[in-house]
Amino acid sequence: MSYKYLNIRFDSEFSIETETKELLDFIKRIPEVKQTDKVQFENKTNLPWGVISLIKCDQRGCFSIDKGQYFEKVNLVELLFSDNQESLTHYQKIGTKIANQLNWELIDDDTDEISMKKK
C-alpha cells in the first residue's frame, strides 16, 4: 500500500504555532474522525483510512512523535492516508476545514502544491 500526505502549516518555515487544546477541540467536532491518542485522530469505521497528527516541528519540518506525546503548541497538522482518489478527496475536505479554521495553507507533501492558501 502506498501513502499520501497533506500538510497544514502557516508557511514553509513553520513560523506560526497554534494552541493545541483549541485545535483538538475543533478537530473533535469533525464527524468523520475520532481521537486515538493525545494529538492523533483516525478515520471512523467505514470511512477511508487515515491518520491526522498535530505536530511541533523545527523550521525545516523535521519532527518525531511518540505515542502519548503532547505538545502545548503545534505548527503542523499532517494528514496521512491511502494513495487513491477516494481517500484524497475525503482528506482534502477534512484538511480544508482545518486549514480554514487556522487560516493556514493546505499543501500536497509530494508536489508542494498549495491546495488552499491563507486568506
Image: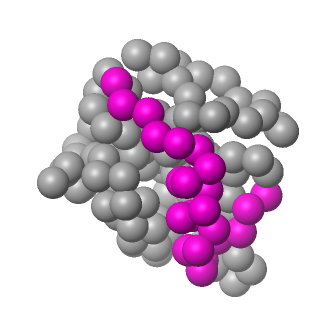
Q: Residue at x 79, y 58 (%)?
A: 36
| Residue 35 seen by the camera | yes
Left or right of residue 103, residue 75 in this image? right
Q: Quadrant of residue 67?
A: top right
| Residue sitting farthest toward the top | 59
Depth check: give the residue in front, 73 or 81: 73
Q: Residue at x 56, y 29 (%)?
A: 56
Depth check: give the residue in front, 108 or 13: 13
Q: From the top left corner, tell me how far across and down residue 27 is, in percent.
A: 57, 64
Q: From the top left corner, tell me how far across and down residue 85 is, in percent.
A: 41, 69
Left or right of residue 100, residue 47 in this image? right
Q: Is residue 12 above or below residue 23?
A: above
Coloring basis for residues: one colour
| Residue sitting farthest toward the left | 119
Left or right of residue 37, residue 2 in this image? left
Q: Magenta includes 116?
A: no
Magenta range: 15-36
Q: From the top left corner, tell me how far across and down residue 30 is, in percent.
A: 56, 74
Depth check: give the residue in front, 77 or 113: 77
| Residue 85 seen by the camera | no
Q: From the top left corner, tell me how far across and down residue 24 is, in percent.
A: 61, 56
Q: Residue at x 37, y 60 (%)?
A: 101
The quadrant the C terminus occupies is: bottom left
Q: Residue at x 30, y 47 (%)?
A: 104
Q: Quadrant of residue 31?
A: bottom right
Q: Is residue 87 above or below residue 78?
A: below
Q: Quadrant of residue 34?
A: bottom right
